[in-house]
Amino acid sequence: MDSVARLTIILFFSWIVQISSESILKLPSEKEISGEYCDSWRLAVETNNVGSWNQIPANCVDSVAEYMIGERYKRDCDVVGKFSTEFAKRVAIGGDGRDAWVFDIDETLLSNVPYYQAVGFGSEIFNETSFNDWVNLADAPALPASLNLYRKLQDLGFTIFLLTGRSEHQRNATEANLLFAGYRNWERLILRGPSDQGKSATNFKSQKREELIIEGYRIHGSSGDQWSDLWGFAVASRSFKLPNPMYFIP
Amino acid sequence: MDSVARLTIILFFSWIVQISSESILKLPSEKEISGEYCDSWRLAVETNNVGSWNQIPANCVDSVAEYMIGERYKRDCDVVGKFSTEFAKRVAIGGDGRDAWVFDIDETLLSNVPYYQAVGFGSEIFNETSFNDWVNLADAPALPASLNLYRKLQDLGFTIFLLTGRSEHQRNATEANLLFAGYRNWERLILRGPSDQGKSATNFKSQKREELIIEGYRIHGSSGDQWSDLWGFAVASRSFKLPNPMYFIP
């Protein structure tokens, strides 16, 4: 090989390596710095430190999009599913059908990522009309970690309740969507009735859990993406918080 | 410049770039894969999904060490401090000295990272004897985000209570350490007395907060690194959860 050919190969290789390594050779860019802040913001959301919020910070849109679409959201959900399953396996099932698990629906059993991807991942204020249109499509995919957990719980003998902030008039679309996504044989789907309108999610969901307890159910576990799915009164023995950096429900 | 000199420069540059970019050119290593799992495990710890645990997973020791010693822990704490301050500024201070904030001590006001660094960052089961020796040294540094918040709260007019699972016999060492770390003028330091031994942290701390409320204090905020600092009854209007992937207190 002559020296010109050698030089060409070296130059080509050096160029390829340079392209691949660009991000680590330069100083941290604005995007990286805001990405670091946004990771801490996301943790603060998950631990309820942010309090009430209705839009993700403008400089965190890219970071939240990357989180939701990339591997991290899936991995975080899988690990929540793993700990949920480990706990569920240790529950002594009574055989009377009263051992219950309560699931929230949106961002818990069903993923609305296709909808939120189209509206900027929580960077815009919640639009009830367009979200309801999406709900009526009944097209939301299952959250894989939750579908997996749901099936395992049924195998273990749990009775499953679905408790959602969706309204009673969305019952048909919600049932159709759950079936489409692979969910089967839930005991009851509890939606907000006319008398539940205006209640906070925490209050509405606590009341409904309390009714189940009065009926004789033992609520061992509860899964939701909002603390308002899990806190309040009549709480489950163990609550499992799935991640959701896209929106907040009080 | 002759072609040999040029070639040398190019080769040298290509070598430097290669070294710098090694980590992104190779396939993800075992360490990186376990680091990804450990990030999800850490989130699961922070959201209380793991339940009771007494050792960090063996393959997460490096990841937890990196988190605690690197920039992320500091940044995560700073963001919690930011949201705490934002909330505190919105509280209407009554001027009667009854507007209270409750702080936990370990991993909240004081950092035991120097101790945990010496014992494997939570990879070993808690050793009460060696930890008590460390407490008696009164040498723990302040958690910078908390010292900052503490001072801002005092400027705003909050009355500050310190509520810790440490024992009454550690009062002197604890006071000395707090002063050494820069804390001043707390209203009261509440430790576990003889009658509090054996109570869960959640129960002990809830009872003590309830006593403050009975005394007429309005507990607006509470800061802690464990959910057992924050949950239970007589909870603050807002609770702020600092990260701690090193140990769990029920």
Image (spheres, coloured by chain):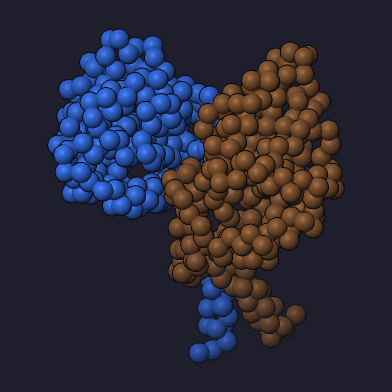
Chain colours: A brown, B blue
> Dividing the picture into quarters, in which one does residue A146 lie?
top right
Q: Residue at x 83, y 33 (%)?
A: A185
How far from the left and from the top, in percent, is residue B194?
Answer: 28, 10
How far from the left and from the top, in percent, is residue A231?
Answer: 53, 34
Q: Is residue B80 above or below residue B103?
A: below
Q: Residue at x 81, y 40 (%)?
A: A183
Q: Residue at x 45, y 58 (%)?
A: A37
| Residue B65 shown left or right of residue A180 in the figure | left
| Farthest bottom residue in view | B1
Q: Residue at x 23, y 30 (%)?
A: B216
How far from the left and from the top, in percent, is residue B40?
Answer: 59, 42
| Residue B131 shown left or right of residue B44 in the figure | left
| Residue B57 shown left or right of residue B189 in the figure | right
Q: In front here: A128 or B234?
A: A128
Res B26 seen here:
no
Quadrant of the frame with the N terminus of chain A: bottom right
How far from the left and from the top, in percent, is residue A205?
Answer: 60, 36
> Dividing the picture into quarters, in which one does residue B220 lie?
top left
